Structure formats: structure tokens, C-alpha cells
Image: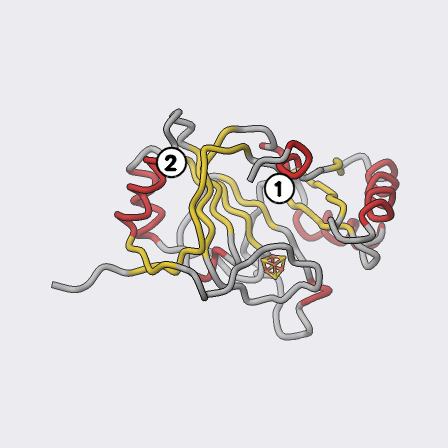
């Protein structure tokens, strides 16, 4: 008998609230994979393999069901970069358990299995020429972290690339947050297709 595939999982937690994008405020649980293919300068996520667990899909689903004690049946799959490990087996197991799957990806990898909601948070300023945005991805929403490198032309380029979907500008939460917030507000004020996204979970102090 073959061993089940194991996934490198950094953490699972909940119940909590989705903090960003169109579904901000919704109750959910989180599945956070370890490992990322980018190294964004202002990344605030610990995705190191150290301290992660090798878990099979049955164990992941069982733990998420335990965490989801109020029955949101919404799992936010993130990382690191979740597309590096996402596959049909895990997608099917989560769906069979009744979960809607919302994934947050940097958009540089195609998905081996479908999700119910795909957030792409592109960071080409950190690709260093080695990565490109995957051409076949069709995001439900695009969330751009606004730092000093993001301007109107950047947002316009994403609108051209992805067409009809929801667009969010979210200020980078680093030491220059006030400046990034002002920049994000200015950008969305001038581009009506865009909305401001704040990191609700940080504002209200939940994980
Ligand atoms: S893509 Fe996301 S998780 Fe990966 S380094 Fe950048 S901000 Fe961090």
C-alpha cells in the first residue's frame, strides 16, 4: 500500500475572521502551508519549513473540522505560497468535508486543482526576473499591497491583465504604514474599480 501524500503545513488555526479583501469579516479557519517561492522584502509571514508538520489530507481535514466548531465551513488556504503544494487530493478531501476553499496566492504558479475563490496578490517587484505571473489563472479578486513601488500604471496594468474581477489596494504594513495608507487611499480615489482593503484582523487584534 502506498503512503498517503504529506503536505508541509506551517499552522492551522481558527475559528477566526478573514481579514482582507471582499470576504473580510467572514468567520473561517486557516490552513497555512510552509514554503514560498518569493522573498518579498516586507513579508510578515513565517513560512519557514522549520517548525512545520508533514500531514496527510485526512489529518488536515480532521483538524480543520475540529477548529471549525461553529460550522463556517470556510477555509482560507494560504502560505507561504499555497499553489506549491495544492493538489486534487487535498482539494477533494476539503470539498467532501463541506469546506469552501478560498486561496490566497502570489499568482506565479498555476493551480493543480480548482478553488472556490482565488485571491491573487501579485508582487512582481520581488520576482527578480525569475518568475512570471501564471497566464492561465483567473482570479476572483486581485489584492495589491501598496508600497512605494506601486503607482497608477501598476494598477492599470493589472486591470488590463485580468479584466473583470474585484480589485483591492492594501497598504503595506511596515514602518512606513501611514505613507502607504495615504498612497492607497489616493490611488483608489482616482480609480473607481479599486477598493481599499485594510488588514481587519490586525485592527481588531485577532490571529
Ligand atoms: S509571496 Fe507572500 S508569503 Fe511569499 S514572501 Fe511574498 S509576502 Fe511572503
Q: Position of residue 37 (x, y in %)?
A: 55, 67
Name the secondary structure under disc 1. Answer: strand
Above or below, 18 against 120 in this view is above
- Tell which residue pokes out farthest to the left in this image: 1
Q: Is residue 148 left or right of residue 195?
A: right
Q: Residue at x 46, y 62 (%)?
A: 84
Disc number for residue 131: none
Name the secondary structure under disc 2. Answer: helix
Instruction: Indicate which disc, 1 or 2, sits on the residue closer to the N terminus.
Output: 2
**Quadrant for the C terminus in the image:** top right
Q: Nearer the viewer, residue 85 or 157?
A: 85
Mark 1, residue position = 141
Q: Residue at x 64, y 51 (%)?
A: 121
Q: Residues within 10 Å of mark 1 (few under 14, many from 20)?
A: many
Q: Residue at x 52, y 58 (%)?
A: 81
Quarter of the image where one finds residue 19 = top right
Above or below, 69 against 184 in this view is above
Q: Position of residue 29 (x, y in %)?
A: 45, 37
Gap between marks 1 and 2 measured at Cα: 26 Å
Of the two numbered discs 1 and 2 in the rendering, the one whose residue sits closer to the viewer:
2
Q: Position of residue 175 (x, y in %)?
A: 79, 53
**Quadrant for the N terminus in the image:** bottom left
Disc number for residue 67: 2
Above or below, 46 against 128 in this view is above
Indicate the quadrant of ligand 1 in the picture.
Answer: bottom right
Above or below, 129 against 51 in this view is below
Colour scheme of the rendered structure: secondary structure
Q: Residues within 10 Å of mark 2 (few under 14, many from 20)?
A: some
Contact, mark 1 vs mark 2 (Cβ under 8 Å):
no
Q: Nearer the viewer, residue 46 or 195?
A: 46
Q: Position of residue 166 (x, y in %)?
A: 66, 38
Amino acid at each position: 500500500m502506498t503512503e498517503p501524500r504529506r503536505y508541509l503545513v506551517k499552522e492551522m488555526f481558527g475559528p477566526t475572521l478573514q481579514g482582507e479583501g471582499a470576504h473580510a469579516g467572514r468567520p473561517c479557519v486557516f490552513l497555512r502551508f510552509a514554503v514560498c517561492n518569493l522573498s518579498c522584502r516586507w513579508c510578515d509571514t513565517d513560512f519557514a519549513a522549520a517548525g512545520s508538520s508533514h500531514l496527510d489530507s485526512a489529518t488536515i481535514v480532521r483538524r480543520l473540522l475540529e477548529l471549525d466548531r461553529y460550522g463556517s465551513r470556510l477555509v482560507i488556504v494560504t502560505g507561504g505560497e499555497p499553489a506549491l503544494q495544492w493538489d486534487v487530493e487535498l482539494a477533494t478531501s476539503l470539498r467532501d468535508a463541506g469546506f469552501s476553499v478560498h486561496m490566497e496566492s502570489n499568482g506565479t504558479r498555476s493551480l493543480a486543482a480548482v478553488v472556490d475563490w482565488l485571491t491573487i496578490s501579485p508582487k512582481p517587484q520581488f520576482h527578480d526576473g525569475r518568475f512570471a505571473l501564471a497566464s492561465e489563472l483567473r482570479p476572483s479578486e486581485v489584492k495589491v499591497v501598496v508600497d512605494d513601488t506601486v503607482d497608477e500604471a501598476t494598477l492599470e496594468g493589472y486591470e488590463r491583465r485580468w479584466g473583470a474581477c474585484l480589485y483591492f489596494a492594501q497598504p503595506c504594513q511596515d514602518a512606513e504604514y501611514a505613507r502607504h495608507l495615504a498612497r492607497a487611499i489616493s490611488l483608489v480615489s482616482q480609480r473607481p474599480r479599486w477598493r481599499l482593503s485594510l488588514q481587519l484582523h490586525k485592527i481588531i487584534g485577532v490571529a
